[in-house]
Amino acid sequence: MSLNVFNGKETQDLLAAATNIAGSEGNPRFKQILNRLLSDLFKAIDDLDITPDEVWAGVNYLNQLGRDGEAALLAAGLGLEKYLDIRMDHEDALAGLDGGTPRTIEGPLYVAGAPVREGVSRIDVNPDPDAGPLVIRGKVTDTNGAPLANALVECWHANSKGFYSHFDPTGAQTEFNLRGAVKTGADGEYAFLTLMPVGYGCPPQGATQQLLDALGRHGNRPAHVHFFVSADGHRKLTTQFNIEGDPLIWDDFAYATREALIPKVVEKTGGDALGLKSDAYKEIVFDVVLTGQVEGKDNQIVHRLRASAQA
C-alpha cells in the first residue's frame, strides 16, 4: 500500500528545509545534489512502501559499510564506477575523441608513492612460490603512433592469494610489493618484471559481500593488472587488463572487462638472463595509446581519496 505523501506540502517543505535548497548559505552544488538524492529516496519510500524496519536496516548497513571501509568496493560492485566510465566514453564520442586505449575502472586498491624506475621495474619484492614469473611490457604512444618519452606508467596487482600489498589481511607482503612505476625513454617503452596474479573476492564477512548475497550475486574478479598512464600534453589513462583465459573474464562482479583489454599471454624462455625466478616465463605485451588534452586540459583526471605511502 502506497501512502502517496511525497507530493504533499508537508513532505516538500521538509525536503526544502532539510537541504536548505532556497537558502543563501552553504554550497549550492552540494545542496542541489543532496536535494535530488533525498527527494529520490523519499519518493522510493512512498512508491515501494518501504517500511521503517527496512529504512533502519539500510541505515545500519551504511554504518557497517563504513566500519568495514568498503564504500569504494561497493561502488565497483554495484556498477557505479562502471557507469561513470560509460558517461566518460559517451562524452568522448560526442567530442570526436577516439583512438586511445580504452579506460576502465580504477578500483579501491591503488596506493600512491611507488618507487619510479627508468624503463624497467622489478616489482616482485616478496617471494611467492605459487606464482610464476611474468613480464609485462609495451610502448606508450600518441594517437598518431609516435612514442611518448617520459610517460609515467604505474602498475599494481594482486599476488597468488588474491591480496594486494598494503591491504593484505595476512600481513605477508611488504610495502609496494607488486606495485611500481616506470618512466619511458625516447622509444616510449616500459616493462615490469613481476609474478602472475590471480583474481580476488570481496571479504566474505564484509558489508559488500553481505549486500551481494542479498542480490544473489558473487563478489569475485578475474585476474587483472591495473594501470595509470600519463604524459605531458595528454590525458591520464586509468585502465586495467584481464589475464587471458581466466574463467571470470566475462563474469566480473565489478564490470571492468572490455574486449580490447584482454591481451595475449605468451610462453617465453630466457628468464634466467632477466633475473627471473625461472627460465620459462609468461609475457604480456600491453601497448598504450594516450589521447591529447582537450583545450589544454585533462578532462578525465578523477579526484578521489587514495591511499599513499613512502617507498
Image: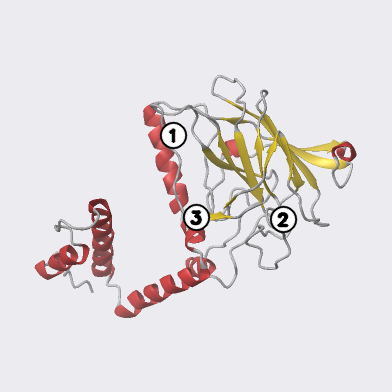
Where is 64 relative to 272, above or below? below
What's under tag 1, amino acid-wise? Asp
Side (left or right) of 158 relative to 36: right
Residue 298 tag number: 1
What's under tag 2, amino acid-wise? Asn
Q: Residue at x 80, y 56 (%)?
A: 128
The N terminus lies in which quarter of the figure? bottom left
Side (left or right) of 55 relative to 183: left
Q: Which residue is mark 3?
A: 76
**Label 2 to label 1: alpha-carbon separation:** 32 Å
Q: Earlier in the sequence, mark 3 or mark 1?
A: 3
Whether residue 243 is visible here, answered yes or no, is yes
Q: Earlier in the sequence, mark 2 or mark 3?
A: 3
**Label 2 to label 3: alpha-carbon separation:** 20 Å
**Considering the numbered disc 3 on the image, is that residue within a helix, a strand or a loop?**
helix
**Considering the numbered disc 1 on the image, is that residue within a helix, a strand or a loop?**
loop
Mark 3 neighbour density, 10 Å: few (under 14) some (14–19) many (20 or more): many
**Considering the numbered disc 2 on the image, is that residue within a helix, a strand or a loop?**
loop
Q: Residue at x 41, y 31 (%)?
A: 297
Which of the two marks, 3 or 1, is nearer to us in this view? 1
Where is 301 relative to 169, above or below? above
Side (left or right) of 256 relative to 93: right
Q: Percent from the top left, x then y, of residue 233?
A: 49, 27
Residue 159 tag number: 2
Count of residue discs: 3
Q: Are marks 3 and 1 in contact (CB under 8 Å)?
A: no
Whether residue 224 is visible here, answered yes or no, is no
